[in-house]
Amino acid sequence: MAAEELEDLCCHINAKIGCVKKLLQLRAIGREASLKAVLANVGQEMAVLHGLLGELEGEVNQRRQLAALLQETRKRVEEERMEAELLQRNVPLELSFKKEPRLVKKPIKEAEFVKEAALITVEEFENVPGYMRGRLTLPQINASLQILHAAAASKYKILHQNPKSMTSSIRSLYHRFREEETKETKGEIFVVEADLKEFTQVKVDRRFHAVLNVLRHCQRVREVRGARLVRYVLC
């Protein structure tokens, strides 16, 4: 009901109330046979007034519910905005490398070995089952996907180097990478938890595994298991 309609309804109700007041003033003389019709009219007017008041009350309750829903939606949007801003400020820190920080300054060379991550779209995220998403947000999912790709970029940059020119620590990583490869991962890009700990500051905890479940559902990552090791293959 529009505001103009509400105003018209209020005016109508006020008019009815005024009419009832006038009719009640005649109640004292209602014993006269000539005025019985007037008293009957009073009853009819009161019934109409009762119906209008019920309609007005229903409209008020509906508007209260709508206002509460809008308030809740506004609160959720504000929380999402603040969380997105926080992630935007913190993502560069999560993508920093512990052993070789200079790699962060050269994203062009990293891209030679690992393709840029195809971020999850809003439509894809909305199609993820609610029990799987939980309280995760789209910015969190995409930030974690970028972290996986950043770790893979550092790993495969080492794999493309000449082992003879490596330091002993880098050469040790190189040999571990080769040992973790299988027939199923031939020609694929993958990382393991040790790579995430080596090249990023992300915590591989329950929340991160929940993110991985969403990434698997969206076909950005798949798992290859073997030799007590889980390999996260980038799709």
Image: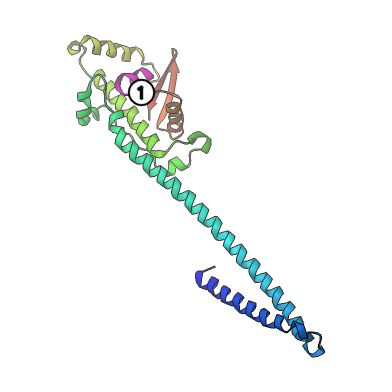
- Mark 1 neighbour density, 10 Å: few (under 14) some (14–19) many (20 or more): many
Number of labels in the image equals: 1
Foreground pick, 134 / 75:
75
Residue lying furthest front:
28
Residue lying furthest left:
165
Image location of residue 104, percent across then percent down: 23, 28
Left or right: residue 150 versus residue 38 is left
Secondary element at image label 1: strand
| Residue located at (51% from left, 69% from top) | 2
Q: Label 1 amino acid?
A: Phe
Task: Determine which quarter of the picture holds residue 199.
Answer: top left
| Residue located at (47% from left, 49% from top) | 73
Residue 6, relative to residue 163: is it above or below?
below
| Residue located at (63% from left, 80% from top) | 18
Residue lying furthest bottom:
34
Image location of residue 140, percent across then percent down: 39, 35
Left or right: residue 3 versus residue 150 is right
Range covered by the magenta-colored residues: 186-203
Foreground pick, 235 / 168:
168
Q: Quadrant of the N terminus?
A: bottom right
Left or right: residue 63 versus residue 177 is right
Where does label 1 land, which residue? 190
Task: Determine which quarter of the picture holds residue 177.
Answer: top left
Foreground pick, 102 / 216:
102
Image location of residue 125, percent across then percent down: 44, 40
Image location of residue 180, percent across then percent down: 36, 14
Magenta stretch encompasses residue 50: no
Magenta stretch encompasses residue 196: yes
Residue 144, relative to residue 225: is it above or below?
below
Q: Quadrant of the C terminus?
A: top left
Please say which color scheme the image uses: rainbow
